[in-house]
């Protein structure tokens, strides 16, 4: 049997990357400007500015650490530079050691000890140039298709999402799993009303119980603050696009993960296992959800949209898929795959799924997505607690 392969990057821990990013991580919001300037000075580096890392406690502090560590551990990252201020709650040395366990080079320093922003930018740029030069010497190897971990996400949805682009992505998801790869679906908020259907697909009662628990956990959090999901989900754009209820949206949402059994329910930013379908407890917010998938090790995220959205991700290529021809004509600069032929009869479901599957393989082999070409490197950490 011939093993389907593409060219990628072998990592010391036995994993493979489809990109070879130099990642520059600020441990705290106070380091954002420094990491941004370093990234501007050193081509082919990626910075992930964020608003966290200070005045956080308990599970909220742990989540920030886990997302930063997971993003650095993502196999698309070849080396990491961590920039701290010097007095935040995220420990830069612990962060470096956690990422370094994957075998990739990791360096860190703090702005206070270096002597302020200007000196920190100069110091960081010197380190980043050296790390980038080392990465540029990395030789590419044959990577088995079975190594791929792919996230499936929808955002800016309309009626065409549930009718066409999500089911087509589900066909492609089944193909990835059939090749031995992994699919992860998230958006706990967007399975409400359809959670019983996914629960029936869980491989055992324990997984089913965990799926129900994360839904109930979210509902309890909403009740605590006396809020109503309606107006936030479905969003005003969803409603204008023809989605009337969260149940209607959820039924379309779950079709994008195909038909495989759900092997496990994992927490936000938890590492995605190899092979099969997994559910990640994550918000519907596009950037927070995709960032959690990337922190979990997703190589690629496939993102369906009917209304249109330009966002990408810092370390994982985001493939934009639509079945809305009018939107595609307006926003073709942002869209990678057009499956609107499903609605006109020019494509059947298998053909539409094959278009997406081929795009996944080509992006894994090095083709840049529209979001990558346009420089979209959005990153955001989902919070679960108050600031002190």
Image (cartoon, helix red, strand yellow):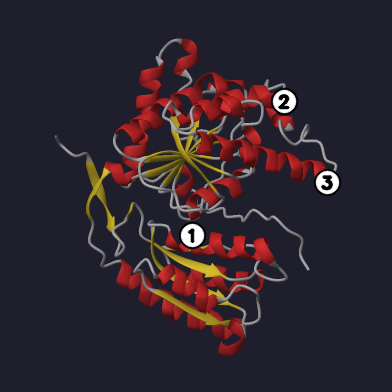
Q: Position of residue 116 (x, y in %)?
A: 62, 85
- Residue 226: quarter of image: top right
Q: Quadrant of the N terminus?
A: top left
Residue at 31%, 46% (x, y): give it. 147
Q: Earlier in the sequence, mark 1 or mark 3?
A: 1
Res 42 seen here: no
**Mark 3, residues whose alpha carbon is within 10 Å: few (<14), some, or many (≥20)?**
few
Q: Position of residue 38 (x, y in %)?
A: 51, 72
Marks 2 and 3 sit apart, C-alpha to C-alpha, by 24 Å
Residue at 56%, 53% (x, y): give it. 378
Residue at 48%, 52% (x, y): give it. 294
Res 178 seen here: yes
Residue 218 horizontal side relative to residue 338, left or right: right
Q: Nearer the viewer, mark 1 or mark 3?
A: 3
Q: Toward the viewer: 272 or 47?
A: 272
The residue beneath circle 1 is 70
- Disc 2, SS: helix
Q: Residue furthest right?
A: 226
Q: Residue furthest left?
A: 1
- Disc 3, SS: loop
């Amino acid at each position: 049997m011939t093993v389907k392969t593409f060219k990628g990057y072998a990592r010391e821990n036995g994993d493979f990357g489809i990109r070879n990013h130099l990642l520059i991580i600020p441990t705290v919001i106070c380091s954002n400007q420094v990491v941004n300037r370093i990234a501007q000075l050193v081509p082919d580096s990626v910075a992930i500015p964020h608003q966290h890392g200070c005045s956080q406690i308990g599970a909220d502090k742990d989540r920030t650490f886990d997302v930063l560590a997971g993003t650095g551990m993502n196999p698309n990252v070849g080396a990491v530079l961590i920039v701290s201020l010097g007095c935040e709650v995220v420990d830069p040395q612990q962060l470096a050691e956690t990422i370094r366990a994957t075998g990739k080079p990791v360096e860190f320093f703090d702005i206070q000890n270096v002597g302020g922003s200007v000196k920190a930018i100069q110091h960081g740029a010197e380190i980043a140039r050296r790390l980038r030069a080392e990465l540029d010497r990395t030789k590419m190897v044959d990577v088995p298709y079975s190594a791929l971990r792919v996230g499936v996400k929808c955002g800016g949805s309309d009626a065409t999402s549930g009718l066409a682009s999500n089911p087509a992505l589900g066909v492609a998801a089944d193909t990835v799993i059939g090749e031995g790869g992994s699919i992860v679906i998230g958006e706990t908020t967007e399975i409400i009303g359809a959670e019983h259907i996914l629960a029936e697909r869980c491989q055992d009662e324990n997984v089913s119980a965990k799926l129900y628990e994360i839904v109930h956990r979210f509902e309890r959090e909403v009740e605590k603050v006396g809020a109503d999901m309606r107006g936030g989900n479905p969003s005003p754009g969803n409603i204008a696009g023809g989605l009337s209820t969260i149940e209607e949206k959820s039924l379309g949402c779950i079709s994008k993960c195909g038909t495989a059994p759900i092997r496990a329910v994992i927490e936000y930013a938890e590492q995605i296992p190899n092979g099969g379908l997994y559910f990640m407890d994550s918000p519907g917010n596009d950037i927070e959800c995709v960032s959690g998938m990337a922190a979990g090790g997703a190589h690629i995220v496939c993102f369906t949209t009917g209304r249109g959205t330009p966002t990408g991700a810092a370390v994982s290529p985001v493939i934009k898929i639509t079945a809305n021809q009018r939107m595609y004509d307006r926003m073709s600069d942002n869209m990678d795959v057009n499956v609107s032929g499903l609605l006109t009869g020019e494509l059947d479901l298998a053909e539409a799924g094959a278009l997406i599957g081929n795009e996944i393989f080509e992006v894994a082999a090095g083709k840049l997505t529209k979001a990558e070409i346009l420089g979209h490197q959005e990153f955001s950490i989902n919070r679960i607690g108050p600031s002190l």
